[in-house]
Amino acid sequence: RGGQAQREIPFAQAGNLTKVYAIASGKGGVGKSSVTVNLALALAAQGRRVGIVDADIYGHSVPAMLGLADTRPTQVDDLIMPVPTASGVSVISIGMLKPRRDQVVAWRGPMLDRALVQMLADVFWGDIDDLLIDLPPGTGDMAISLGQHLPGAEFVVVTTPQEAAAEVAERAGTMASMMHQRVVGVVENMAYLPCPHCTEEGKEHRLEVFGSGGGERVARTLSQRFGHDVPLLGSIPLDLSLREGGDAGKPIVESDPTSPAAKVLQDIARHL
Ligand code: ADP
């Protein structure tokens, strides 16, 4: 839009009623995108109008997890229409801004900043109750841009129980607070594997594949560091159907809503 004034970000304006949550993690592969899509669908199932911004420049796996991998947004005048899921969640992904899906992007800070502003301001979001932003892992340029453009965004930090993961997750949470953003809580993912053989005998034995305590540790550290309660919102077990649901484009809160993992996600969504 050469020469035209930049459109304002609706969520940054006075009187904005949309809750904006950034889903952050210290490192990749801990389940940040899985948590984002499942929380979005759980919120939608509770009757809320929900949008997702997939800002994970390295991963941008949100469309595939929702069965929208080959869907491109349409444009009406100079507004981008987000892609709707079957359950009515509006989705835009940084991957959708590229001419081709397989294209490798080597964007630097200013381009990431422009991409984020475009996804927030040039997309027709309508009246949504919640906007979930899937951030790239770590404490990079995208998180800084978000802090500058949407200081009111609240953070949900995702970690695994592992010591090393918890340590980098604490840094991601600290980054949010340096930008004066609030961390609403911590989600521990891949918390344990319910041993399938033991459950067959009517008892539950938990295999702590990635150790234990990471979620509690991040919650405690961030609470101490910032002087307000940063709770552990929930611990999601390892679940085959969570991975399968993500691969098949039908996340677990829809494909297997009564599973223990889906129940934790629904519970977290209720308390957001
Ligand atoms: P991130 O966004 O942090 O990189 P993803 O959400 O893409 O992580 O998850 C990485 C992989 O792990 C995906 O294949 C996903 O399906 C799988 N996964 C995530 N959480 C779980 C879980 N609780 N149980 C089983 N598989 C999981």
Image (cartoon, helix red, strand yellow):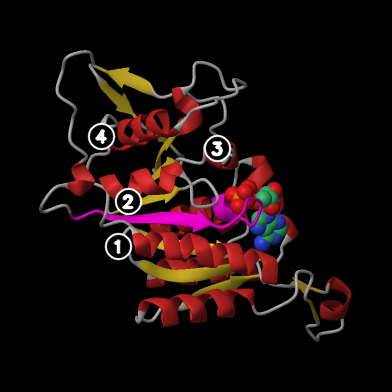
Where is residue 157 drawn, in percent x and y?
A: 49, 63
| CA separation in Å, label 2 and label 3 | 20 Å
Asked whether 18 or 249 is in front, the reply is: 18
Q: What segment is highlighted magenta in the picture?
A: 17-34
Q: Secondary structure at mark 4?
A: helix
Report the residue marked by disc 3.
60
Task: Say whether disc 2 or disc 4 marks the residue closer to the N-terminus.
Answer: 4
Residue ID at (32%, 30%): 118
State the residue position of label 2.
147
Q: Tell me the residue at 73%/73% (across/down).
A: 192
How many marks the image carries: the answer is 4
Circle 1 residue: 180
User: In the displayed structure, would residue 7 be above or below residue 38?
Assistant: above
Q: Position of residue 221 (x, y in %)?
A: 50, 78
Residue lying farthest to the top in this orientation? 2
Residue 251 in sight in this render: no
Q: Earlier in the sequence, mark 1 or mark 2?
A: 2
Look at label 1 and name its amino acid: His
In the image, taking residue 83 as reference, residue 165 lies left or right, namely right
At a point 24% along the width and 53% down the height, the residue shown is 18
